[in-house]
Image (spheres, rainbow, N blue to C red):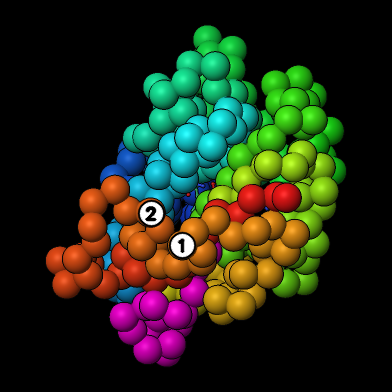
């Protein structure tokens, strides 16, 4: 298999990666045939997957604007992915050029691309670290140099927690991150769920099986389980809802929307 110049050395390009599959769903070009094949297979079971991703990105951008409206200008985006249109730093720095963004991902392709995109931007960094080891994120020199944890931070865990299995204790990792954040900080989350999907659990299970096969299990959680990530936060209105229903900029007319966009949950919490 030919390795394109942008692919960092050391990565196995014969194994699909969730970040490159996500890039493919969003119409990006940083993916290999192996990623496209896995993504197409998942789409055979859930043809609306790209709609879910688009609704996810749109929510993320509204949440970033909300954070700035709240006066929060520091962002910690964990599981940030391969940069694509409308990244957090682009949205935030277009509104407030002083906004600071620390991206974190454990995928080498996501890290390499973020480095290229962020070159010359002294208010945005990318750190290679793992959400399952929150101490390493806090102690990462690039992150701690850029962000002042004595002041509020908007912590984004967008479409990443559903890749952390229960055995890896995602709720404990999120709680550890909460404990390093100052009062007034925000937690911004989206999470996949069987709730809201316009398919039976068995039908949707086919797509989940694709992720299991590539050893990146997609963990569908219930609304209650997702809600527990917000322990220690007060939910911002309208609470934990379907992605298009979180503070839409124009009224949502459900029958005009793709039903897939209403899969899973989105919410923002504020640390008291
Ligand atoms: C579906 S993408 C989401 C990207 C972006 N947050 C968004 O919503 O547009 C999930 C990202 O999480 C990253 N990821 C998965 N598990 C992770 C972990 N344990 N630590 C850090 N990043 C992780 C993947 O590499 C991938 O880039």
The answer to whether marks 1 and 2 mark residues whose Cβ atoms lie closer than 8 Å is yes
What element does badge 1 sit on? loop
Q: Is residue 200 magenta?
A: yes
Q: Dot 2 surroundings within 10 Å: few (below 14), some, or many (20 or more)?
A: some
From this viewpoint, is residue 61 visible?
Answer: yes
Q: Where is residue 143 in the image (x, y as percent from the top left)?
A: 72, 28
Q: Mark 2 points at which residue?
A: 247
The residue segment tinted magenta is 190-205
Which residue is rendered at x = 74% and y = 42% of the image?
Answer: 183
- Which of these two is toward me, 4 or 213? 213
- Residue extending farthest to the top is 120
Q: Where is residue 56 in the image (x, y as percent from the top left)?
A: 40, 54
Which badge, 1 or 2, comes first in the chain's sequence? 1
Residue 266 located left or right of residue 166: left
Is 75 drawn above or below residue 106 in the view shown?
above
Q: How far apart are marks 1 and 2 (CA)?
A: 7 Å
What element does badge 2 sit on? loop
Which residue is rendered at x = 71% and y = 26% of the image?
Answer: 147
Which residue is rendered at x = 81% and y = 42% of the image?
Answer: 180
Q: Dot 1 surroundings within 10 Å: few (below 14), some, or many (20 or more)?
A: few
Q: Quadrant of residue 228?
A: bottom right
Residue 77 located left or right of residue 86: right
Is 70 drawn above or below residue 265 in the view shown?
above
Which residue is rendered at x = 46% and y = 80% of the image?
Answer: 194
Q: Quadrant of residue 102?
A: top right
Position of the N terminus by quadrant: top left
Q: Mark 1 points at which residue?
A: 238
């Amino acid at each position: 298999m030919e390795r394109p110049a942008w692919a960092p050395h050391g990565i196995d390009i014969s194994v699909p990666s969730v970040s490159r599959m996500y890039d493919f769903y969003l119409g990006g070009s940083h993916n290999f045939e192996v990623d496209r094949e896995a993504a197409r297979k998942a789409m055979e079971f859930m043809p609306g997957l790209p709609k879910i991703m688009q609704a996810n990105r749109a929510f993320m951008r509204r949440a970033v604007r909300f954070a700035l409206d709240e006066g929060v200008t520091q962002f910690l985006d964990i599981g940030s992915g391969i940069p694509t249109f409308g990244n957090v730093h682009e949205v935030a720095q277009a509104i407030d050029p002083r906004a600071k963004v620390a991206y974190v991902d454990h995928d080498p392709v996501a890290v390499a691309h973020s480095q290229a995109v962020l070159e010359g931007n002294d208010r945005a960094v990318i750190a290679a670290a793992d959400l399952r080891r929150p101490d390493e994120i806090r102690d990462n020199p690039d992150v701690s140099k850029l962000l002042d944890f004595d002041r509020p931070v908007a912590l984004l865990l967008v479409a990443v927690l559903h890749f952390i299995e229960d055995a890896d204790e995602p709720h404990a990792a999120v709680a550890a991150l909460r404990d390093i954040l100052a009062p007034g900080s925000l937690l911004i989350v989206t999470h996949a769920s069987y709730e809201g999907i316009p398919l039976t659990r068995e039908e949707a299970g086919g797509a989940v099986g694709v992720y299991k096969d590539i050893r990146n299990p997609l963990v569908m959680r219930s609304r209650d389980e997702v809600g527990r990530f917000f322990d220690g936060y007060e939910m911002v209105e309208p609470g934990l809802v379907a992605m298009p229903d979180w503070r839409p900029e124009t009224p949502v007319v459900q029958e005009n929307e793709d039903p897939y966009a209403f899969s899973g949950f989105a919410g923002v919490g504020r640390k008291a």
